[in-house]
Amino acid sequence: MKKLVKRYRLFILLVIINMVILFINPSVGNNSLEITWNNILGMILLLPPIFILLGLLDVWVPRETMMKFMGDNSGLMGVSLAFFLGSAAAGPLYAAFPVAGVLLNKGCKFSNVLIFIGAWSTTKIPLLLFEASALGWKFMLIRLALDLPGIALIAYTIENVITDKEKKNIYEWANLT
């Protein structure tokens, strides 16, 4: 029971906070509960297909293939593939982390996984198209031109700043999930 409470402590805290808000101010509390419920429902509807696709990726793509294309010796091909996968992805950012875990399990270079997450959050193709239509192509292209080297710089900086032990812990944690 203690383990269950520890695992779901943030969810339990969210329920308690919502109940307190509902008690103090019922109209705000009802709004808060509705927003919370819609977010939970959105995650419940989105995550199962992502986990199914991750399971298929895990089974269908051999580790050696992934290491060849995105591993330590993948070079520009790995960086390009990480940018493409992140930019072509669909869904909110929290869906990127299970994918990143599978990439780590498959032996992808740490910086390539960070580039994938950065691309997912910043350079999605639908986002770029919307931005071009709303703010203009010039703005979108300037932002993209700044984002691409920025994502790579952040990824390589993080990879070089963290220790090998920390990287090893991250890879081990990814293998547990």
Image: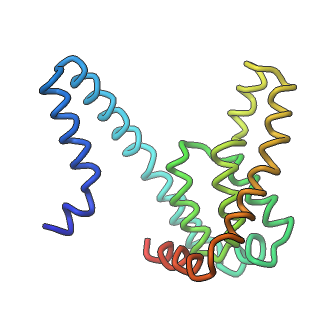
Vertical placement of 127 versus 133: above or below?
Answer: below
Residue occupying the point 22% across, 34% down: 18
Front-most of residues 75 and 45: 75
Vertical placement of 41 versus 71: above or below?
Answer: above
Residue 116 % position (x, y): 68, 57
Vertical placement of 83 versus 36: above or below?
Answer: below
Residue 129 % position (x, y): 75, 29
Q: Quadrant of residue 15?
A: top left
Please indicate whether residue 125 sits to the left or right of residue 146 in the image: left
Q: Quadrant of residue 81?
A: bottom right
Residue occupying the point 15% across, 67% down: 2
Q: Which residue is most to the front?
A: 161
Residue occupying the point 69% across, 41% down: 124
Name the colour scheme.
rainbow
The quadrant in which the N terminus is found is: bottom left
Residue 87 % position (x, y): 71, 46
Residue 23 % position (x, y): 12, 27
Please indicate whether residue 2 sits to the left or right of residue 138 in the image: left
Front-most of residues 80 and 148: 148
Residue occupying the point 81% across, 58% down: 80
- How many marks the image carries: the answer is 0
The quadrant in which the C terminus is found is: bottom left
Front-most of residues 99 and 174: 174
Please indicate whether residue 140 sits to the left or right of residue 158 in the image: right
